[in-house]
Each structure stands twice: as structure tokens, then as C-alpha cells.
Image: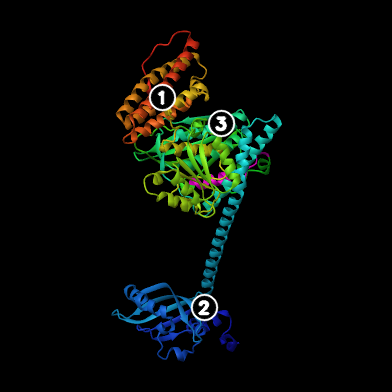
Amino acid sequence: MDSLAKTPCGPDTALAEESAEELYDSAPCGYISTLPDGTLVRVNQTFLKWMGYSREELLGGKRFQELLTGGGRIFHETHCVPLLQMQGAVNELSFDLVRKDGQRVPVLLNTVQKKDASGKTLFHRTTLFDITDRRNYERELVLARKRAEEATRAKADFLSMMSHEIRTPMNAIIGLSNLLGQATLPPLYQEYARILQSSSENLLVLLNSILDFNKMEAGKLMLEERRFDLRQLLHGLCSTLSVKAEEKKLSIRVEFDPEVPNALLGDPVKLGQVLTNLLGNAIKFTEQGAVTLAVRRLHGDAEGVFLGFKVSDTGMGIPQDQLTQIFEAFTQASYDITWKHGGSGLGLAICQKLLALHGSKMRVESVPGEGSSFAFDVRLKIASGAVALDAPAEDLQDTQTLQGLKVLVAEDTAVNVFVLSQFLRRWGVDFDVVENGRRAVEQVQARPYDLVLMDLQMPQMDGCEATRLLRRLPGERGRHLPIIALTASALLGTDAQVADAGFTDVIGKPFMPRELFAKLALHGSRLGAAPRARSGEAPPCQERGASEAAGGGPRFDLEKFKSLAEGDRSAEIELNTLAIGTFEKQKQDLRKALEAGNVEAFDFHTHQLKMPLALMKPRVLLKALDQGRKLIEMPGSQASRLRDVIRTIHEELDAIVDALKEDVREKAGVPVHRVGPCTSMWD
């Protein structure tokens, strides 16, 4: 019994028998000890197994540096040793060890100095971890990332190429459907044309959404910074969407905080894209009631302002459990919505990405059956100085605006030439057509043009090369000639290519007629593209004003302006009377500013008229104001042209005043007396 009691047994005894040396030798990591010069003095069995050496081979005077690659030895001497001397330890340094058979073992090294009582270094103790698996994993990650990037590029190239192929026939479909819609057709065929036009425009919206999303995924979409008037931007958006709203008998309301500055710096195109999408969705999903756009100033300073935007509707609403899904790409709240209303489910995803560029994010609140509201905040810089009055492009679309404009069309596709020709003839544009860039350069040298429409892809010489040659022509004409690129391409580098070539602007194919019209009106007028007076005819402004009055359509519309009184007869009389006094005074103030060449005064007085003119839409007057602004900025302007502009401004303001007086007479039954102005009502 005593002998049995003395016999070691059990797990505690076995554990005690395992020595520290055995733990050192069989550890899963490598342990080595070296002298300060790197000579190996101790290694464990794990390290020997990794390297394929015997203990005697390594401890016979071999230095640790000799086991490193060439680059590793340099790094060890220049970085590891100095760092070890300064800090007393180094951690997580990566090296490749060279085995006896020449193979490499990637390791992660940790070294600490061991010193005596006097501070002298005795040896270095190093722990090494085999990171072969980690290195392979990292290599696989790099390869996977490379394959993903290649796949993304391939997808982007495919989408860009396909968009070009789709846009070319769509240019003809949209152009001809618009022409059919303007033709006299039997009722049934009018309905066919309307469906064709609506469907083709929806297809274009879908194509543009996919391409926008593609650009965002590729990181190629950047914010621009340019001056714009927020009130004018919102006016244009609401005017464009009012047609769809009126079809559903919906009203669009705008609640605009008066503390919001007029002149801002930002990207109006991308901001407008977000608001257009939200307003379009609100109209689409609302059957009765109203859609409201609210803009308010949150806070700001002298340089910038935070604005809060909110679009609310009284539509079908969104269930709470689906609110998080609607911002995902190609996703809508339910299948029923896709079936009934259509759409790709990309709109809100694009909005969210556009807002991310602004450092913002969309918020949504919704109650099923009661409506939804989408809100976001953005910071915009405040622009200094006054903003010149610009008329919305859609307000300038009359048959006289482009009359006599001389345009060169460089386009090699017969269908595209046919579509362009139909619209240009309808607008009274004098145009020539060439089939390649080389002929375009020759034609510009042979005949003066106000503007060039240049296709990018043409035989013999493409549009970019032709534009570069035109910009290098001697004299001022080639440098300042407006050249608009026509492109069906959506390649991610196209924008930079167009900008480098020297194009003035770009129109994507397929284009909407109003977009083409607006670009021609905007850039054609910069070089005096208004109709040229022929021998014995009236000057341009006078001639245009007369033709409008004779039969070119209404010169202005008072209905929206009078709607400010909300049907109150007394309020309408007071509103008209105040406007009469304002217009009478501003007529003289504008004349004085033009005659004196005072740009600041002219901008101030046009700003005073901005709100009533935006509601009245006096096309001829807006064009005259725009031409007057350009004349006083142009050194050496002809006095006769300036007098013609002043005469047109006076005639158009007199016509508006006469109409307002007549309206007051009808409602009050008394003559109208001249009153003092109240310019503050337009601020």
C-alpha cells in the first residue's frame, strides 16, 4: 500500500513532468535567440522544421541576416536594427526567410533586447509567426479585387456601348414622334402619336437613370460649382412638371422661405435632378390632393447657408416595413406599384447617391393612405453680386426666337439629319449640312455661321478633331464660335473628351426638341444671333416685337400674376395698381441704366421685376432685357442697337401696363390713375 501511494500517477503528475524546454521546442511559432551582431545561439524545433536545417548547421556561426532575402537584409540593417536600438523592441515586421532548399517562408517578426544590470545588450530574443496562409489570403483578395474592377469596367463599357446603339434609333423615334404630335391627324392617330411619344420619353428616362447609376458606381460623377438662382430653378422644375400634375387635376404648391438667398453657388443640375425625381414620384403616386415643395433656411453665415428641402404629397403612402427598401437600386415598395405605375426603382437610389456627394442623406416619413414626405438638407455657398434676369428656356419657344439663325450641322447619319432638319426648318433656322468634320472645317472657313452642331463620331474626321482645328483658326471667330457636340455616347470619358476639344456645350442623342431649342437660343444669341435686319426692314428688336404683336402668339400672360389675389376682386385691383406704378418707374430706371452703361443698376432694376415677369412670361421683353444686358457689357456697342432695345423694352412694358389698366377698369368700373411704385413687393 505504501509503495503504491508513492508511485506518481494522474494528470497533475503528467503535466508536471512536461518541462519548459519541451514547451519551447514544440511551440507553434518559431523562437530564436541571437547575439547583438545577429549570430544565432538558440533555436527551437519549430524553426528548424520550417527552415530545413539541423541545429548544428544553424548554431555553428550562422547569422540571422543570412537567412533573409537580399531586400530583407537591406531592410533589416537600415530599419530594423536602428529601430531596435532606439526602442529596445520591434513588433510586427514582415520578412521572407530563405529555406535550405531555396523556398521562401513569409514570417512576422517580433524582437526584444535583453540587457544586463548595467544596460549592456546581451542578446536578442525573437518570435516568428508563419504567415504563409495570410499571405495567400491577401494575394487572393488582391486578385479578387482586380477581377471585380475588371468586371465593373467591362459592365461600364458594355452599358456605354449599348447606350450608344440604343440612342441612335431612339433619336429618330423621339424626334419623329414629336413631329407627329404637332401634325394634324385624325383623333385615333393623335392618340397613337401621344402613346408613342410618352413611351419613348419613358424609355429615355430609364436609359439615363441606368447610365447615371453606372457613372456613380464608377466614381465618375462629381459636383460642379456655378452660380444659379434657386427661385428660378424651382420655377422651371414646377413649370415642367405642371403638365403631368394638371392631367391628374393635382396642384403643385411651393413654400419658399423669404430668407433664402437668391444667388447661390452649387450644382443646380444635380440638385434639380433630385427635386425633379421627388416631385415626379409624388405626382405619380398621388391621385387626388396636392404636391408641396417646401424650402427653408435652417442656418448659415456670410459664406454659406444650410437649406432644408421637403417634398410632400397626399398619395398612397408607403408601409413602415418597406421604408428601408425603397432606396435600394432596382427596388420598389411592392410589385403592385411596378405593375401599375411602372419605373425601374432606380430614382431614389440615384437621389441618395447624389445627396451623398453633397454630404447629405434623404429622410422619409409616410403613412399609408395619407401620403409621404421626403426631406434632405444641403449646404450651398452664397454668390456675391446681383443675378441677371434669365428667362426659362420653355418661355422662349416661339417661332421668332431663332428666326434667321445661321447654323452648320455636321452629321453623317441620314435619319438624324432628317430629324434635325424638320425642327430647324420649323423654327426658321438657316442651316447647311455636311457629312464629316473635314467638310465642317472647310464650310466654316467659307461661310460665317452663328453656331455649329457637331456630331462626335463621323468618317474621315471626327467632331473632336474638327473642333480643335476650328479653335485654332486665325482671328476671333474660330475661338468664340459656339460649337455644340451631338453625341449618343455615354462612355465615362466622353465628358472630359468633349471639354478638352473645346466644345461650348453638349446635347445627348436622343434629344428632346425643347432641349435643342433652348441650347440654340442660349448660345446662338451670344454672337448677336437675333434675326439680322435686311435692307429697308426694321431693326431686330423692333421687328420682333411687332411680329409678336401681329400674330406670333400672346406677348405675355396675366393669369398667373392675377392668381396671387386668389380670386379677391379688391385685392386684384390693388395688385394691378401697384404693378402699374412699379412698371412705369422701372421703365425710366432701365432706360437710364442702359444709356449710362451701368451694369449694377440694370441688374438691380431687372431683379425688382423678376417675380412679376416670371409669372407674366413676357417673351419679347425678356429677350430685350437679356440683349440689353449683353450690350452694356460689350465695349463699343452701337448706340443704334441700344436705342432699339430701349424702345422695345418701353413698348412691351407699355403693353403690359395697358392690359393691367384695362383689367382694373373692367373690375372697378373707374379710370386708373398713376400711382407711386411699390418695388418692395417684388423682393
Helix, strand or loop at label 3? It is helix
Q: Residue furthest top?
A: 670
Q: Residues within 10 Å of mark 1 (few under 14, many from 20)?
A: many
Q: Earlier in the sequence, mark 1 or mark 2?
A: 2
The disc labelled 3 sits on which kind of residue?
Answer: Ser
Q: Label 2: few (<14), some or many (≥20) within 10 Å?
A: some
Residue 464, compared with residue 368, is above or below; it is below
Give coordinates of residue 106: x percent, y percent. Answer: 48, 76
Q: How far apart, in angstroms, are the residues tagged by discs 1 and 2?
A: 94 Å
Mark drawn on residue 648: 1
* In the foreground, 672 or 28: 672
Give the extent of the magenta segment. Answer: 340-355
Q: Does residue 611 appear in this view?
A: no
> Disc 3 and disc 2: Cα gap in Å?
74 Å
* Residue positioned 50% across, 49% down in the render: 439
Rendered view: 545 above or below 436: above
Residue 85: x, y in percent?
32, 76
Provide the residue designation for mark 3: 242
Residue 127 position in % (x across, y down): 44, 77
Q: CA distance from mark 3 to mark 1?
A: 31 Å
Which residue is disc 2 drawn over?
Answer: 28
Q: Which of the colour schemes (rainbow, by chain, secondary structure, one colour) is used?
A: rainbow
Q: Mark 3 packing: few (<14 Cα in 10 Å), some, or many (20+)? A: some
| Residue 537 lies within the magenta run | no
Using the image, determine if residue 363 lies above or below residue 94: above
Disc 2 is placed on an element classified as loop
